[in-house]
Image (cartoon, helix red, strand yellow):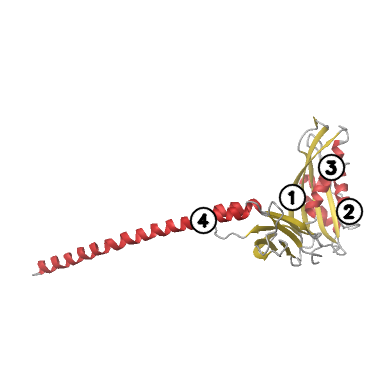
Amino acid sequence: MLKNYKLFNATILISTVLLALPSCTTTKAESTSKESEDAKIEAVSVSNFKKEVENMNITLVSAPDAPMAGSPFAKPFVVSVKDNDGNPYSNYTLSVKVPTGKNDGVIEYETIEAVTDENGRVSYKPSTFPTSMNAVITFSPEIPFNSSTNQKLAKAVSLEVPCRVRFALVKKSILVNLVDYDQKGKMIVDSGITSSNLVGEFWRAGYPYQAQNADFHKQIDAGSAAVYARAKEMVQGSTYYKYIVYGKVKYASDIKEVEGGYSLSLTGTVTVIDWTTGKDIYTVTKTSTVVDKNKWAVYKACQTQLAKDLCNDLVYSM
């Protein structure tokens, strides 16, 4: 009787498994059908989106000047969305990726929606930022179906616009010292040309009398620890100095004869110390190349260009 009972239970178990099998097969078929339907939806979406954006042109109409940190933008960014024939995309939704601030020196972004007016234009005015900013605002067509193909189509017609905020310096000063090196990599003690050029660029950028040359060539050549020690001696507890900008300028190439004259590349690596905290807050490396008809003038011309390129980066990053 016990054997028959076990056999009866085994029969029930086998029957249950067999009854469950068709259900599994149906589920797989339904899954395949859904995948096929999703693929069709994506194909239609890509086709429609391609037609929508293939003749689209997003262009910059106007942009505000970079304000000082803590000051509002004077006017909004304005872009225009038109087709190749100049017809506006009116009442059209754009995705706008905008900066929201900085966290430990890293720029953070969010994406918002903006709808064009009857002329195909859209405006965006950023909020006021308390710190410097070297960011971008990206205007893109809104993607109806998020696929890799649609993302590529949107990126192809997107517009990136610089969104910059200059660092504020109220009743404070900047100490600047860049060391020039010769073609053999040796420090030029009596040069300081690039350093003086950078001070001049800071003045022209809106910080007159606040940027000053300092002298700690040997310490820069020795390393950052020596720079800190020398800066501490020079500052002597004064709260007037906000930033210390120091670095090295070296040959990135030899002077070469090229079409139009002579070419030279110089590379500058610069570090910024926030002296109120004693911490490095920014480091940048820039390489500048110039061509000059005069072989003996190309070096100074390249120093001048490098100072401009460094300043253009630093004022939005310090």
Q: Is residue 296 above or below residue 106?
A: above
Kind of residue at badge 4: Val
Q: Which residue is mark 2?
A: 204
**Where's the N terminus, which quadrant?**
bottom left
Kind of residue at badge 3: Gln
Question: Which residue is at the front of the view, 216 or 147?
Answer: 147
Q: Which residue is mark 1?
A: 284
Question: Which residue is at the front of the view, 106 or 87?
Answer: 87
Please say if the residues under marks 1 and 2 sit with CB atoms less than 8 Å apart.
no
Instruction: Point out the tag, 4 or 1, that comes first from the N-terminus.
Output: 4
Q: Residue at x 84, y 49 (%)?
A: 177
SS category of the residue bearing label 4? helix
Q: CA distance from mark 3 to mark 2?
A: 17 Å
SS category of the residue bearing label 3? helix
Q: Which residue is mark 4?
A: 44
Q: Residue at x 32, y 61 (%)?
A: 26
Among the 4 quarters of the image, the one containing residue 231:
bottom right
Q: Residue at x 10, y 67 (%)?
A: 4
Q: Which mark is residue 303?
A: 3
**Where's the C terminus, which quadrant?**
bottom right
Q: Is residue 155 above or below residue 291?
A: below
